[in-house]
Each structure stands twice: as structure tokens, then as C-alpha cells.
Image: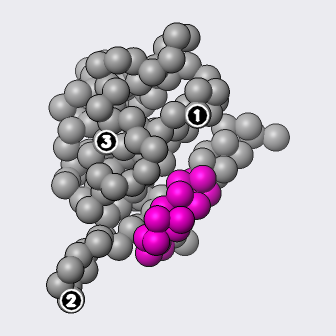
Amino acid sequence: MNQSMYLGKASEHLIISKLLSEGREIYVPAVDDHGVDLLVRTIQTNSSHTYQEIQVKSISTGGLFAAISCPKPSPNYWFVFYVKDINTLWLINSVDFTNIASKNVKGKNVGKYSLSLANKKGPAKNWSKYIITNFNQLP
């Protein structure tokens, strides 16, 4: 049994559940081959709509998210990070993510990003502004 795969899918469903409970319209791509787990319709007052792309990343313990691809950061592409043991979610726009994360410059993960959002004591204080309990920050 691949625990990582199960946690990943369970985390996606957790995020879907939270978004649905907020009245969001959500679409799940049939294939996750472009780093997009969910499409969320933007809340707008006029008749035009756009979509926010969301990539969900999860781990059981710790807080280091490593080897994260983000080839095309944009204002409508978001990461939701989840650490199961401390039941904490972070919502970070991809543009912010590429600015605050460390970019790997050597090794097998060159060009990918790493960010430590928590440690054994809990969430890292320097990234606390990204911790969420709801998705109000999402357009």
C-alpha cells in the first residue's frame, strides 16, 4: 500500500470538501499531468468568470515540502500545503511560492523548489500569514 498516494488523494478530498462547504464551484481534471488537482470558479459579481488552479501537496509529519515543480507561476495558480499530524493548511499563490521557497540549483531536482512550513514544534512562524482555516483569500 502506497501511504503517500493515499494521503495525497485524501488531502485532495479534504480540500474539495472545505471548498464545497463554502459554496465554491469545483472541477477535478480527469488527469493530473499539469500540476493542477482542482479548478475553482472565481467568485465574481459580474457575469464573467475565471478559474483558479490549485495544486494540493500533503505530508504526514514534519513540514518540509521538497522537489516541488512550478514552471509557470501565475496569479491564478495556487498551492495548498497540508501537514496531517498538525492538521494545518497553508494557501500560497505560486508567484509568492517561487519568491519565498528555495530553488534547487544542483542534484536530481534542479529547478524545483523546497519550503519548510513546519517543524517538530509546529508551524513555522515566518510562514504563519499563509495558514488558513477557510478559503476566503482565494478569489
Visible in this render: residue 108? no
Q: Nearer the viewer, mark 3 or mark 2?
A: 2
Q: Name the disc covering residue 87, or none.
A: 1
Whether 40 is drawn above or below 64: the answer is: below
Visible in this render: residue 89? yes
Residue tagged by mark 2? 47
Which span of residues is magenta-colored? 12-27
CA gap, disc 3 to disc 2?
27 Å
Spot occupied by residue 42 in the image (x, y as percentages of width and height): 29, 71
Looking at this view, is 126 or 96 the one in front? 126
Q: What secondary structure is marked by label 3?
A: strand
> In the figure, is residue 21 to the left or right of 104?
right
CA gap, disc 1 to disc 3?
17 Å
Neighbourhood count class around disc 2 (C-alpha, 10 Å): few under 14, some 14–19, many 20 upward? few
Q: Would you say the residues marked 1 and 3 are in contact, meaning their CB atoms lie under 8 Å apart?
A: no
Q: Residue at x 53, y 57 (%)?
A: 18
Whether 95 is drawn above or below 88: the answer is: below
Q: Residue furthest bottom?
A: 47
CA gap, disc 1 to disc 2?
37 Å
Neighbourhood count class around disc 3 (C-alpha, 10 Å): few under 14, some 14–19, many 20 upward? many
Comes first in the chain, label 3 or label 2: 2
Looking at this view, is 48 or 111 the one in front? 48
Spot occupied by residue 120 in the image (x, y as percentages of width and height): 55, 11
Q: Residue at x 34, y 27 (%)?
A: 128
Q: What secondary structure is marked by label 2?
A: loop
